[in-house]
């Protein structure tokens, strides 16, 4: 995706930098980047605010990241809290924590382990797996994904509230509340799941 410029951006402690094209971007501590970022590897360990969009071959977030734009990535992984004001397009999007994406999350594979409240307006992927992380947290019952539309080939959901779920094979696990399910091959729902209507298309 990105060849990089051979220049690295490193924020250690508390700092602010300008956007641009870099080889590696590393934020350790509390950092703000004003502008769009293009890089090969992006890594956050702490708290980061990106006032712009991010395009990275590999983007890793441990802590909290606020991105006031879009995210384009090969592999996007996180542990903590992520907020994206735009949309996200990645080969793989996976992690544990809480996520807010205002637009579409489009990926080949989406794997979410819910620890905090999560909202993604729309999800489109080949494989979608959303599970409630069993480790107790202060969020307790708020380990829930809410979405408008979720669409994929192979879909497995837990603790998910959505208006529409579409897929070839759809499995709804514990704690799901789905208004409408449309499936092509197979559909199965846990006894605790609530489904308004379901149809084979």
Image: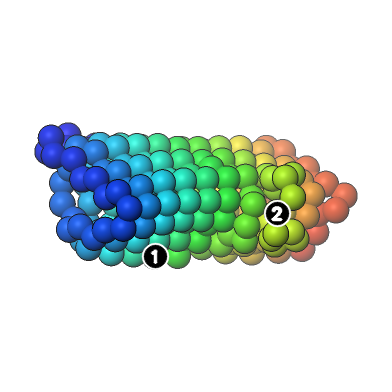
| Residue 196: percent from left, percent from top | 77, 63
Name which residue lies at 45% across and 65% down: 102
Element at badge 1? loop
Looking at this view, is 54 or 152 the one in front?
Answer: 54
Give the side of residue 26 with respect to residue 157, left or right: left
Element at badge 2? loop
Name which residue lies at 80% across and 59% down: 194
Residue 5 visible in the snapshot: yes
Looking at this view, is 39 or 1 the one in front?
Answer: 39
Name which residue lies at 13% across and 35% down: 6
Disc 1 target residue: 85
Residue 125 visible in the snapshot: no
Looking at this view, is 48 or 108 the one in front?
Answer: 48
Earlier sequence position, callout 1 versus callout 2: 1
Disc 2 target residue: 137
Report the number of discs.
Answer: 2
| Residue 40: percent from left, percent from top | 25, 37
| Residue 119: percent from left, percent from top | 56, 62
Looking at this view, is 35 or 128 the one in front?
Answer: 35
Q: Which mark is residue 167?
A: none
Q: CA distance from mark 1 to mark 2?
A: 26 Å
């Amino acid at each position: 995706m990105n060849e990089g410029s051979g220049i690295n951006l490193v924020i250690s402690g508390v700092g602010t930098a300008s956007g641009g094209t870099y080889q590696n971007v590393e934020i350790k501590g509390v950092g703000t980047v004003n502008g769009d970022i293009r890089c090969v590897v992006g890594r956050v360990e702490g708290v980061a605010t990106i006032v712009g969009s991010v395009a990275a071959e590999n983007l890793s977030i441990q802590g909290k990241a606020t991105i006031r734009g879009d995210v384009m990535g090969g592999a996007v992984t996180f542990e903590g809290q992520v907020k994206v004001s735009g949309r996200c397009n990645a080969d793989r999007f996976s992690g544990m924590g809480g996520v807010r994406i205002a637009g579409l999350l489009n990926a080949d594979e989406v794997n979410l382990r819910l620890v905090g409240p999560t909202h993604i307006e729309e999800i489109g992927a080949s494989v979608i797996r959303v599970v409630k992380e069993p480790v107790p947290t202060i969020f307790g019952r708020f380990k829930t994904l809410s979405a408008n539309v979720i669409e994929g080939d192979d879909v497995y959901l837990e603790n998910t509230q959505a208006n529409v779920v579409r897929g070839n094979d759809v499995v709804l696990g514990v704690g799901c509340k789905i208004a409408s399910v449309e499936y092509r091959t197979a559909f199965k729902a846990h006894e605790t799941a609530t489904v308004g209507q379901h149809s084979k298309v």
